[in-house]
Every structure is written in C-alpha cells, then in structure tokens.
Image (cartoon, rainbow, N blue to C red):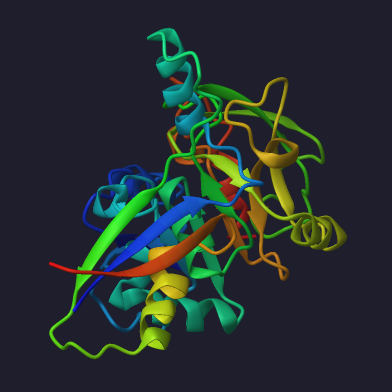
Amino acid sequence: MKIGIVVFPGSNCDNDLFCAFEKQKMYDVIFLWHKDTDLPKDLDLCAIPGGFSFGDYLRTGAIASKSPIINSIIKFANSGRFVLGICNGFQILCETGLLPGVLIRNKSTKFVCKNQMLKVCNSNTPFTKLYNENEEVNFPIAHHDGNYFVNNETRKMIYDNNQVAFKYHKNNPNGSVDNIAGIYSQNHRILGLMPHPERRVSSEIGLDGERLFRSLNI
Amino acid sequence: MKVRVNIVLKPSVLDPQGQAVANSLLGQGFNNVKNVRQGKILDIEFNSNEVNINMINDMCESFLTNPLVEDYAIEEINT
C-alpha cells in the first residue's frame, strides 16, 4: 500500500506519522505538500497529521481545509479510498465536510496534554480490525480544541451508521458530546480522531497504537 | 467599500472562553456582569464600492464561519 502524509505549514506530527507507518515495514510512505493539486495515481491512503496548520488562525483547521490539495483529497475520499486524520487532521476533515461535526474549544479552556484511556467502539473497520470490540487502549491527547460537537440530528445519524470510532474512557478530557474521541465516515473508510496512536508504536512507551497502522494492510 | 463581519457562537453552544472572562470580571468586582459571549470581528476592505451581498454571505458561510456552531452579521462601515 502507498501512504501519503499531507504536510501543511504548521503541521508538527508529520514525521511521527511517517515513522509510525514506515516502521511496520509494509507500506510505501511519502510526504505530500498542501499546495499539490493532484495526488499520486497509485495512492491508497491519504493521512493528515496533527499540528497547528496555519497557526489555527480563524478556526482550527479552517484555512487548511481550503488548501489546493483538499479538492483532490475530497475526490479521493469520494472514490472510496482511505483517509486518516489525527488531531489537527481530524479538525481539518470536519472543516472540509468529509466527516460530520466540528471540534471546538475544550470545555476547560485549557490545552490538555496527557495519556488518555479510550474504548474501541467498532472493531469491524479497516482501521481497527486488529483490536477487540470495546478494547481499552491508551493513546496520548494533546489539544486545545478537541471538544467534539454535533447537533442531535447528526448525532443520531452517526449512531445509526455505527460511525463512532473511539470514545474517551473513565473521563471526558474536553467536553466532547457523548465522550466521542473519533468518528468514521458512513463507509468507514475515513477516520478522524483527536488522540495520537502514532505516539504509541514503540515498546519503550507503549504499543497500543501499532495495530491501527497494521490493520490497514490486512 | 468596507464591511464588518461580526461572528458569535450560537446561543446553544457552550462558550468556555466567554465564561472565563465573565468569571474574571466578577472577581474584579464588576458584580453586575451576568454573562459574556466571546466572538470575533473581521473588517474586510474591497477594491470596489459596489459589492454583492450574496458574495459576502458566501464568504461567511463557506469559510469565515462554521455554520454548525457560529452565527454572523454583516454591517457596512465607513473609513
């Protein structure tokens, strides 16, 4: 599989995400620049990393969601191929409309940076099939705008289509609706999540994130 | 032509920043403060004097605000 990591001005988890895929020794991983207008023809997954694209000016993810590369990512996603957005990547995917809802300021007003327990809510997707249903995992979170917000109508649709990917477990660090930490698109081929699985792919600090990067190749 | 776009969070959306400001004002002795909602203002200057309001609405709805959580109002301002 060929994986493209999209780099925006202000991305800062791009190298971590690159390494997380690369160290599985099963992917061809490349960087893409946000001003690219076309994606490589043989790309299988487009990954949008964490960071503070464009300084989070205007609204988090808003300016990046209008970058030249976004139109081709929308076409790529609409053709049924894989898109992954982590942290700022999740915020950008919500701003593009590829995922429902929006991430707003944490309820506490504070930036939170800590380990966080999560529950895997749907282990029957391309991203999570190596996890058990309701498995508890520990991924770090590091964000100021992680408070997931949807209206009631959209929330019902998310549950009806089994689109909740991860929920915060034991505590809610940011005020998200129903403790939601990550969601899928309707076809479960686009995943956005606030926590950082790419920071848990080594035996020294934890391997809970590794299976997310391996699931895709199965 | 110049317009001012006022952006506020919808009344149904929690505004923790506004609450923090309100709490601070109360702590400073401004006891009559009931609530604060924090928003933002964008002053946009155009090249021409005639600007289509639909175009400004389009800018606001597609980019300057997220209609899920924000409301906006446009006013013309004099320089």
Q: Residue at x 87, y 61 (%)?
A: A160
Position of A21 relative to A66 (above/below): above
Frontmost residue, A39 versus A19 = A39
Position of A185 relative to A72 (above/below): above
Q: Residue at x 64, y 62 (%)?
A: A100
Q: Is residue A61 left or right of residue A179?
A: left
Residue A60 placement (x, y as % from top left): 39, 51
Q: Residue at x 12, y 67 (%)?
A: B79
Q: Is residue A121 left or right of residue B36?
A: right
Frontmost residue, B45 versus A35 = B45
Q: Residue at x 82, y 41 (%)?
A: A133
Q: Is residue B13 visible?
A: yes
Residue A118 placement (x, y as % from top left): 67, 31
Residue B43 placement (x, y as % from top left): 23, 63
Q: Is residue A133 left or right of residue B36?
A: right
Q: Is residue A167 left or right of residue B36?
A: right
Residue A152 placement (x, y as % from top left): 79, 55
Q: Is residue A200 visible?
A: no
Position of A156 relative to A134 (above/below): below
Number of marks in the rendered image? 0
Quarter of the image for the C terminus of chain A: give it. Answer: bottom right
What is the quadrant of residue B14 in the picture? Answer: top right
